[in-house]
Amino acid sequence: NAGVTQTPKFRVLKTGQSMTLLCAQDMNHEYMYWYRQDPGMGLRLIHYSVGEGTTAKGEVPDGYNVSRLKKQNFLLGLESAAPSQTSVYFCASSYSFLAGDNEQFFGPGTRLTVL
Amino acid sequence: GQNIDQPTEMTATEGAIVQINCTYQTSGFNGLFWYQQHAGEAPTFLSYNVLDGLEEKGRFSSFLSRSKGYSYLLLKELQMKDSASYLCAVRDGSGGSYIPTFGRGTSLIVHP
C-alpha cells in the first residue's frame, strides 16, 4: 500500500496563478483533510471531507476550494495564488472521527512558494 | 473553539527522560492524540488517550487528566533520532465535526 500520496512535491507560483494539489489514498478511508503548516503556527485545517461528494470548511478556508469526486482522491485548488499562501500543505486521511483512536495518516507534503 | 498550549522548544540529553506537556480548553472533549514530526517529513501517530491515566508504548508514554485539561508525552531513554516536533491534537465533539485541532507543536532537540 502506498498510503497517502501527494502531487506535486514542490511548486513555485507567481501571484495570481492557479494550481491544483492532488491527494490520493489507497486505504479506503472515508475522511480526508487538507492542512497548511507554517512556522510557529502548527497544522491548520483548510477543508475536509467526510465522504465522496461532500466537503466542508475548516479553520482557514479562504482562497482555497476543494473537490472529492472519488473516494480515494481529494483535490485542493488555489484559484488566484497570493504570497500569503506560501506554505507546506499536508493531506491526511482517516476512517472516521466519530469515536475511537482513528488516527490520521498524512501524506509527504507539498512545499508551495508564491512569489 | 479550543485553546491548546504546548511549549515551543525543549532540549534534553541523549539517554535522559523528557516530559512534553499539553494543556487544553474544550467544551466537548472526545480524545487527545500525540504525533511526531521529523523536520521536512509528515506527522506520524504516536498515541491516543480518551480516559484518564497513563498509556505506555515502549519508550513513549502518554498521560491524560480530563479534569485538569492536561496531557503529557513522556519519552524515556532518549535517542538522537527522537529530535523532532511533537504535536498535541484534541478532538472536540461539541460542534458535531469531531475533527481534531492541533497545537503549535513542541520542537525537541536531543543532544549528545
Image (tube, coloured by chain):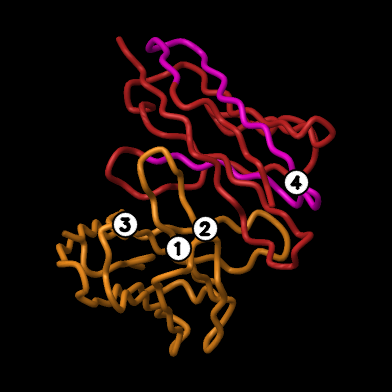
Chain colours: A orange, B red
- Which amino acid type is shown beneath numbered disc 1? Ala
Residue A35 x %, y %: 44, 59
From the image, tell me which residue sits under label 4: B26
Q: Residues within 10 Å of mark 2 (few under 14, many from 20)?
A: many
Query: What's the chain of the residue with tag 3?
Result: A
Residue B112, picture quadrant: top left
Secondary structure mostly taken by the magenta-highlighted segment of the chain: strand
Separation (CA) of disc 3 from disc 1: 22 Å
From the image, tell me which residue sits under label 1: A92
Task: Tell me, yes or no, whether dots 4 and 2 are on the same chain.
Answer: no
In the image, A74 versus B50, the foreground residue is A74
Is A100 left or right of B39, judged from the image as shown? right
Vertical arrangement, residue A4 with respect to residue B39, above or below: below
1 vs 4, front mark: 4
3 vs 1, front mark: 3
Separation (CA) of disc 4 from disc 2: 20 Å
Q: Earlier in the sequence, mark 3 or mark 2?
A: 3
Is B29 left or right of A115, judged from the image as shown? right
